[in-house]
Amino acid sequence: MHRYRSHNCGELRAADVDTDVRLSGWLHNRRDLGGILFIDLRDHYGLVQLVARPGTPANEALGSLTKETVVRIDGKVSARGADNVNPDLPTGEIEIEVTDVEVLGAADQIPFTINADDGVNEEKRLEYRFLDLRRERMHRNIMLRTAVISAIRHKMVTLGFNEMATPILSATSPEGARDFLVPSRLHAGKFYALPQAPQQFKQLLMIAGFDRYFQIAPCFRDEDARADRSPGEFYQLDIEMSFVEQEDVFGPVEKLMTELFTEFGKGRTVTSPFPRIPFREAMLKYGSDKPDLRAELELVDVSDVFAGSGFKAFADKHVRALAVPDTADQSRKFFDQLGDFAVQQGAKGLAWVRVGEENALSGPIAKFLTEDDVKALVAALDLKPGHAVFFGAGEFDEVSKIMGAVRVEAAKRVGRFVEDEFRFCWIVDFPMFEKDEDTGKIEFSHNPFSMPQGGLKALETKDPLDILAWQYDIVCNGTELSSGAIRNHEPEVMYKAFAIAGYDKETVEAEFGGMLRAFKFGAPPHGGIAPGVDRIVMLLADEPNIRETIAFPLNGNAQDLLMGAPSEVEEARLKELHLTLRKPQAK
């Protein structure tokens, strides 16, 4: 018999009764019923019940061990009585009568329970992440991640893509976030940058003639944590294709996502084909460029209705309305709670009216609306008796943020929110440039390497803020999975686009010399995208926080509490790297 096990803890069944077995695993739980010990033994594959009778060496040994001790046991498989069968456990028809026990790894008293979610705080969980990962939910999440990545690789190869690796140590690049810098020992005063994404390298692979590339790529960005974004590092499915237009990229990505979310979505429906929604339309209808289409309500711009209105709260402001049907039976509490929700999103309040018989309006602001206002609203919103209408007024971005959140919350409260579906969409026609609110400077709004719609002519003749780009996002259930673009592959377009964003020719050549040089030697039209692996798994696992799907994430302050990173470095090492420290003064 093998030194440690003849079987794993998840594979024994009724057909194995009377078999002598050897198992190894962790002591998951222990129950003492009249001197008889019932012990759950756990390994990677599952759980099995052990029985140790009173007066036996096994009973004495197992009765004194702490939970999470690693043991090897010998025993015989026996059938459970009919009343003791556990139908929720694959091994629930059998148990193991233990004859011998060997301790393989003693365990100290554990800082939190493994066999139940006892509400331990996240900091403690990350400090003892190796214990946290023993929990069933976390173990399941990490194995889901493994299976998803394996499926992605298989499906990408089937779609004709070739997996290639790109460098980790590279040069800094303006991707929109801060770089992590690595000091060079051999080149004093110079730094490598960890890649925010393999952007330039994957484009260079297209220029080199490889046609269809993919990679499960590690990316590094020095940015703050969010529920759907882990600080420090993350992984993305990096994709690039040659001789393609936008729809050519959408095709294989839609196929991949549909298959992936169908395979691992636990029976949830994947709606397809994915709708294409222009950025401006998404902001107007949904208040977001990552709309949750499960909410089956839409916002409507009614600014024109109140232009020059005597109702000063709405006059000459951007006004968005949300018509919510089937609210006739809703009490005042419904309106107050939705108003409180809007305040939590940053609103000062939430104006509303009810629609009654013959489209008569009632509610807090009804008395401020003229007969013409009412007629215009009824027409614009297709109002019927039983509707309620909620309003947001102010600056466009502020109203979008608040009313976009109200749209989803209202849909959930009135049964207009579809559960158990994955609703994807493409957001297209992003603006190429935007204006910084503080400085007034024109900046890239998305990926600086994108092709502007209209090419060089558009850059030379249009207001920069009117130029659209061949840029797109893929969104699922309100979560942005990825940004992508058809790339610019023409040097003159690149010079001009960067000039509009404030980069002179010399700076462009210094920072992107490799890319420019490649463009000058025959570059094919190409484009790509990079869906976030962590976010894909987060959606499939129904987890609200991305850290629940990563084996060893940093905490919200970008710290590794288990390994103690970031850590201080001794002076000799700093000297070797030609560095001196300038720490901020204590306040």
Image (cartoon, rainbow, N blue to C red):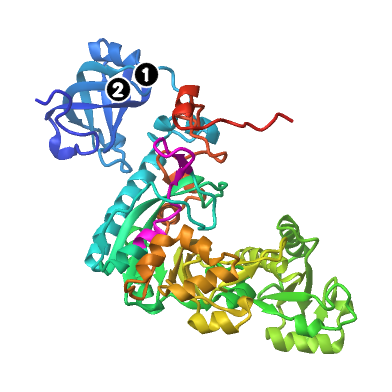
Residue 491 image position (x, y, % from top left): 43, 73
- Numbered tag placed on residue 213 in the rendering: none
The reply to whether dot 1 and dot 2 touch (C-beta < 8 Å) is yes
**Label 2 secondary element:** strand
Q: Residue at x 72, y 75 (%)?
A: 320
Q: Residue at x 61, y 32 (%)?
A: 582
Q: Which residue is mark 1?
A: 107
Q: Which residue is mark 2?
A: 70
Give the magenta part as a residue range.
Answer: 181-202
In-image side of 457 versus 271 (left or right): right
What's the amino acid at mark 2?
A: Val
Q: Residue at x 26, y 21 (%)?
A: 71
Examine the rendered structure and indicate whether residue 496 appears above or below residue 97: below
Occupied quadrant, residue 287: bottom right
**Label 1 secondary element:** loop
Q: Which quarter of the image is occupied by the C terminus?
A: top right
Relative depth, front residue between 114 and 380: 380
Q: Earlier along the polypeptide chain: callout 1 or callout 2?
A: 2
Q: Is residue 198 magenta?
A: yes
Q: Residue at x 40, y 73 (%)?
A: 489
Residue 361 image position (x, y, % from top left): 81, 80
Residue 263 image position (x, y, % from top left): 31, 61
The answer to whether any part of residue 383 appears in the image is: no
Occupied quadrant, residue 347: bottom right
What's the amino acid at mark 1?
A: Ala
